[in-house]
Amino acid sequence: MKIDLIKHKNIDKRKYDECILNANNGAIYAMSWYLDIVAPKWQLLAVADYSFVMPIPVKRKFGVSYVLQPLNCQQLGVFSAEKMTIEIVKMFIDKIPVSYCVLNFNPSNSFHIKELSQRPNYILDISSSYEEIKNNYHQNTRTHLRKIVKSDFVVDKELDLTSFFKAFNENTKHYTGKTSRSAEELAKKAKEKNTLHIWSVKDKKTSEILAATLFFQWKNRFYYMVPFSTPKGKSVGAMRLLMDYFIEEFAGKGYIIDFEGSSVPSVAQFYQNFGAVFESYIRYYNNKLPWPINLFPKLVRRLY
């Protein structure tokens, strides 16, 4: 199999997107419009007919090219509608054209290399009926939902993006400004494509936003992105209520909710309490930077 490196300006995005859409392991993160936002100068490793492709989020600083997993982009790797083997994935890895690489591979990409670690993701299949799904909620979640006085709240499915990100930035500290700007650009583009769902829970009396999240829809999958709750929202369990309503709305229609993580135990537990199951993916790390830069991880992080 001959694999070529294609510079960004030479990528045939029509053929590339066709491959991602038809791939057995396709993902929204790999679509060209998504990559153009999170990694504007991305390059491509591909066979001539684009039957196997691997987007490379290349960046450059101080004259050195490197690869880092982009913000708001959980997984990439090798994509294809054809059978994926360990050997094929290894061939693509060997073609990565940089000396410093941190890249997340999708769950369909298996390989035996020492420079990797397992990362957590949680997904919830909501293709069965709402009653069946709810029966798999953790007892604590069912108890909390029964205690919530639903007449005190309203679920809004039409919150505008400006209001969403204003409230998001006021109530989150762990997101950097760059991450928030990237998420906002992605949301605007998804809205243009009519694949964005903005859900929020508000106080019925004051119309105050208590919790909200974006769902990016791609094929049969909803990606749960940039969720937040206000202090009051956390105290009343507003996000639990939001998720329960969302699941009820789309249950039995063949969808999957992709929660995008998390390695934070309390957040992972929140997903599991709705019946979400663990699904791991691989983070590949390779540092072939020359001495002495490769001896100083903090310097490397600052430089790259």
Image (tube, rainbow, N blue to C red):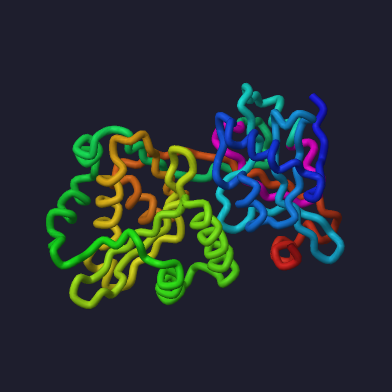
**Which quarter of the figure has residue 19?**
top right
Is 103 in the magenta?
A: yes
Furthest residue to the top?
A: 83
The residue sitting at 29% across, 35% down in the picture is 252
Q: Which residues are magenta?
A: 93-109
Asked if residue 261 lies left or right of residue 277, the reply is: right
The residue sitting at 64% across, 40% down in the picture is 17
The residue sitting at 39% across, 39% down in the picture is 256
Residue 289, x across and y down, in percent: 82, 53
Residue 79, x across and y down, in percent: 63, 34
Residue 20, x across and y down, in percent: 61, 37
On screen, 55 above or below 73?
Answer: above
Asked if residue 105 lies left or right of residue 220, the reply is: right
- Say which quadrant the N terminus sits in: top right
Is 73 in the magenta?
A: no
The residue sitting at 75% across, 41% down in the picture is 12
On screen, 302 above or below 126?
Answer: below
